[in-house]
Amino acid sequence: MVKMTTEAQFSNNDFQDVVLHRQSVRKFDPTVKIELAELQAMIDEATSAPSACNLQSWHFVVAASDAGKAKAKQLLMPFNYPQVETCSVMIFILGDTESHLVYRDVWNKACEDGRISAEKRDQIFKTFLPLYENASPAFLKMDATIDSSMAAMQLLLVARAHGYDANPIAGYAADKVAVTFDLDPQRYVPVMAVAIGKAAAEPITTTRYAGTEVTEFI
Ligand SMILES: Cc1cc2nc3c(=O)[nH]c(=O)nc-3n(C[C@H](O)[C@H](O)[C@H](O)COP(=O)(O)O)c2cc1C
């Protein structure tokens, strides 16, 4: 269950291009299909994202089939229909508020592999587990939302590294996401959907506030 980062085969390994030329693409070439193995690799790469205490509180629902995309479309606000109708895949990222229940496995594996000592593992359990085992639902939801946001951003960039483009989407019926995918809505919180495919139209070039307007040095 625990994967260490492997060497990914990126078709675009130009960091500057991947990061600084990313733009939200909302119209894709509908004929482009992405193999499930490549989708899984992209998700594996996205989960190299950091997470609080390495809890990895994320869960991915991949709508690549016509039936999956039809389900996804039911959730979307109409202004997001063009993306789901043309993308190769729409991936929903949900936060898992129960990730701490399997947290021991991650560090037990690290210990078995000889990457950390038993003392270090026990110290991690003692320091971090009570934070989560005694946490409020609001805290668990916030933590899972932040972790999943990190993975979502990573997925946007990984998609570009694989030669695709993407659009992050939160314009959907958030209260219906988990149940639509037969997931427990108490456990899983919707964070983001990411439409991925080959761009079929030039995206709008967006601008940002000057860094100086949103920065203070203290
Ligand atoms: C939390 C979040 C929600 C978003 N929801 C949508 C959405 O529902 N539909 C959409 O077309 N774009 C959505 N976007 C994309 C933004 O509109 C886009 O990132 C922003 O306009 C900047 O453009 P850029 O991504 O091309 O740099 C969302 C982005 C974020 C971060």
Image: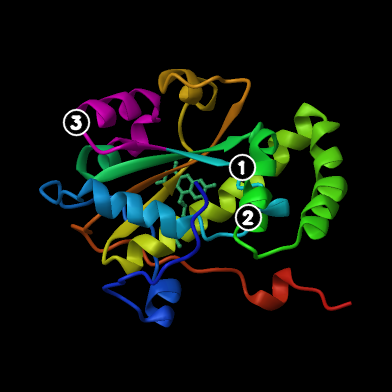
Q: Is residue 146 magenta?
A: no
- The percent position of residue 63, horizontal first and vertical second, equals 30, 35
Question: Which residue carries the number 2 mark?
Answer: 112
Question: Would you identify the image quadrant in which residue 214 lies?
Answer: bottom right
- The percent position of residue 82, horizontal first and vertical second, equals 26, 40
**Residue in view at x 40 percent, y 25 percent:** 75
Which quadrant does the C terminus fall into? Answer: bottom right
Question: Which residue carries the number 3 mark?
Answer: 66
Secondary element at tag 3: helix
Magenta range: 61-81
Upstream in sequence: badge 2 or badge 3: 3
Label 2 Cα crowd, 10 Å radius (few <14 / some 14-19 / many 20+) = few
**Amino acid type assigned to the residue bearing label 1 in the image:** Ser
Q: Are marks 2 and 1 in contact (CB under 8 Å)?
A: no
Question: Which residue carries the number 1 mark?
Answer: 57
Report the magenta stretch's main SS: helix
Q: Answer above or below: position of 168 versus 161.
A: above
